[in-house]
């Protein structure tokens, strides 16, 4: 029998990637999984309201004035309380401490709106546009304690057209984010991959 895998989602904002994962689970595109808890560092994150309206458990943990590890200990405790197997960062705008990363070895994923290692950090779509890149895209990767680093699981590219604006490019990339985050979570939960150095490759299982 398959055990249902429990996903913990961390977010700071809108929550469209969280909703894409929740929709994929509901539609069976990610089998044997559920979102067990949505955690946010921001009380006003629309993603928290979206989780509540889906009757998914939520927890807001304000980070103000706390050292990184002190904060992360609280988050990890909540994730353990909810018996989370896999942590998905979905627009979570905080760097994780080594303590957090060690608590979930190869069990934390992030989605980033650029073709890493290009354009890490903030406003990646704007960075790509201003740089003059002809292709932009998104990356799902395992998380380590560095910013937008860690072995790459999946990427998707979109062409940058001459008339693209930051808004139009972000929208094109977001559609691909929702698609590849689902694919990556499915792959990782099924254990159909191996990591060699920085390379993540598919295996049969
Ligand atoms: C997404 O574009 C995600 O890739 C990005 O924040 C947005 C969150 O949107 N994440 C990062 O930049 C992480 N470095 P969402 O709240 O609608 O999922």
Image (spheres, rainbow, N blue to C red):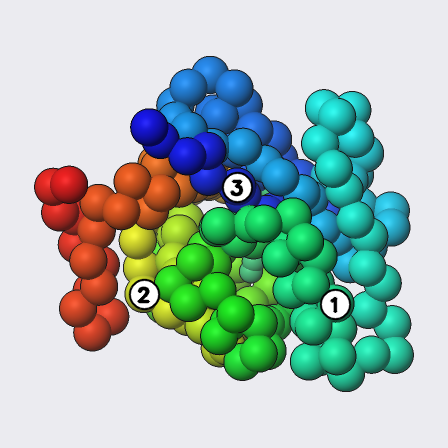
- In the image, residue 74 sits, relative to residue 13, either above or below, namely below
Name which of mark 1 and mark 2 comes first in the sequence. 1
Residue 192 in view in this figure: yes
Taking the spot 43% from the left edge, 58% from the top edge, the residue there is 107
Quarter the N terminus occupies: top left
Taking the spot 65% from the left edge, 48% from the top edge, the residue there is 82
Residue occupied by mark 2 = 151
Q: Residue furthest left?
A: 204
CB at mark 3 closer than 8 A to ligand 1? no
Q: Identify the element where label 1 is drawn.
A: helix
Q: Identify the element where label 2 is drawn.
A: loop
Report whether 60 appears left or right of 111: right
Query: In the image, residue 79 lies at what x, y percent?
Result: 64, 55
Report whether 152 appears left or right of 94: left
Q: Can you tell which mark lies on residue 6? A: 3
Q: Identify the element where label 3 is drawn.
A: strand
Q: Nearer the viewer, residue 104 or 186?
A: 104
Residue occupied by mark 1 = 74
Q: CA distance from mark 1 to mark 3?
A: 18 Å
């Amino acid at each position: 029998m398959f055990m249902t895998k429990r996903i913990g989602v961390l977010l700071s904002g809108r929550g469209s990637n969280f909703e894409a994962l929740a929709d994929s689970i509901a539609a069976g595109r990610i089998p044997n999984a559920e979102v067990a808890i949505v955690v946010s560092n921001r009380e006003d994150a629309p993603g928290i309201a979206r989780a509540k309206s889906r009757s998914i458990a939520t927890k807001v943990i304000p980070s103000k004035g706390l050292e990184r590890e002190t904060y992360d200990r609280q988050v990890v405790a909540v994730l353990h309380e909810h018996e989370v197997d896999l942590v998905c960062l979905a627009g979570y705008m905080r760097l994780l401490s080594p303590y957090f990363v060690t608590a979930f070895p190869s069990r934390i994923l992030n989605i980033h709106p650029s073709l890493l290692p290009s354009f890490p950090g903030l406003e990646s779509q704007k960075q790509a546009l201003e740089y003059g890149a002809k292709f932009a895209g998104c990356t799902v990767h395992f998380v380590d304690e560095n910013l937008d680093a860690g072995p790459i699981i999946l990427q998707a590219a979109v062409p940058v057209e001459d008339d693209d604006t930051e808004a139009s490019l972000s929208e094109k990339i977001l559609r691909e984010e929702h698609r590849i985050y689902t694919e990556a979570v499915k792959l990782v939960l099924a254990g159909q991959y191996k990591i060699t150095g920085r390379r993540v490759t598919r295996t049969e299982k």
